[in-house]
Image (cartoon, grey):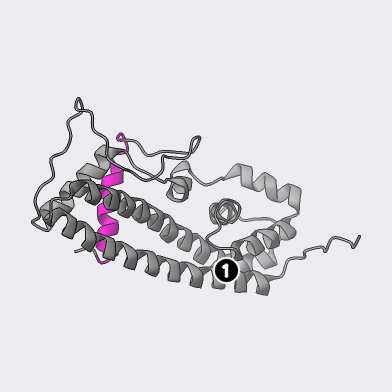
Amino acid sequence: MGKKQTVTFDSSRCKISLTTAKARLKFTIEKTSDKNYDKLKDVIKLLEKEKFDLAFIKTQNIMVNNYHLKGMYELDDHIEHLREELPTISKNSEMASSILPHMCAIVWASRNSSLLPDLITVSQQLSAKYGPEKFEDFLKLSYPSEKFKSYFTTSAFPDKFVWKYLLTIAEDHRCPIPTIPSEEEEYTFPTLESVIPGVYYPTEDDQALLEDIRKMQEMDKFK
């Protein structure tokens, strides 16, 4: 059997991987935004035809994609900050505290999302820089927030949130207004797959969630 190749820290290789990841992320953001814009037009048409159940499904999909987009924008910031810190990383044997949040977010993404394979190389490079054991210790000190992780793991929203957002779309575009089922009324509409058990799930108590989605609407061409 051949010997396992030892990875040594290479600032240039790390920078190339971060730059490539940033380019991939930009493409994915633009593609997802365009798809959501098309989905919004579909929702409006369905509302005009009063096909509220189908509009509900597409609205759920838009909300999930918008939530993923929010995570992508935040990850893009982490990538950019770490890229700017590479000269500091190269010169110092100890890690600056300012680097930790960005490094941890990037490493988490490399291990839990297939979105950017280039981040695996970045993770390996950082592990080589600080040593595997010390590197893992760093990750325990400043792991990404549950909110950040939820951007990539959430696969559905509570029905009430979807109805509220669908109602907003209908009002903004002067479409027929769907009747939101009451709390007592039992109803069954087809939805996307259930939330993965064991991961953070945004609840109705998350007051900022709907506002976050509205902001994403403005950022991604939703008028």
Callout count: 1
Picture residue at 31% right of the left edge, 62% below the top: 36
Instruction: Identify the secondary structure beneath mark 1.
Output: helix
Residue at (12% x, 56% y) in the render: 48
Relative to 87, residue 137 above or below: above
The range drawn in magenta is 204-221
Asked if residue 219 lies in the magenta stretch, the reply is: yes
Front residue of 109 and 193 = 193
* Nearest to the observer: residue 97 or residue 173: 173
Residue 84: image x %, image y %? 54, 68
x and y percent of residue 41 in the render? 21, 63
Name the residue that disc number 1 marks: 18
Quadrant occupied by the N terminus: bottom right
The overriding secondary structure of the stretch rendered in magenta is helix
Q: Residue 144's x, y, as percent?
A: 52, 47
Amino acid, disc 1? Leu
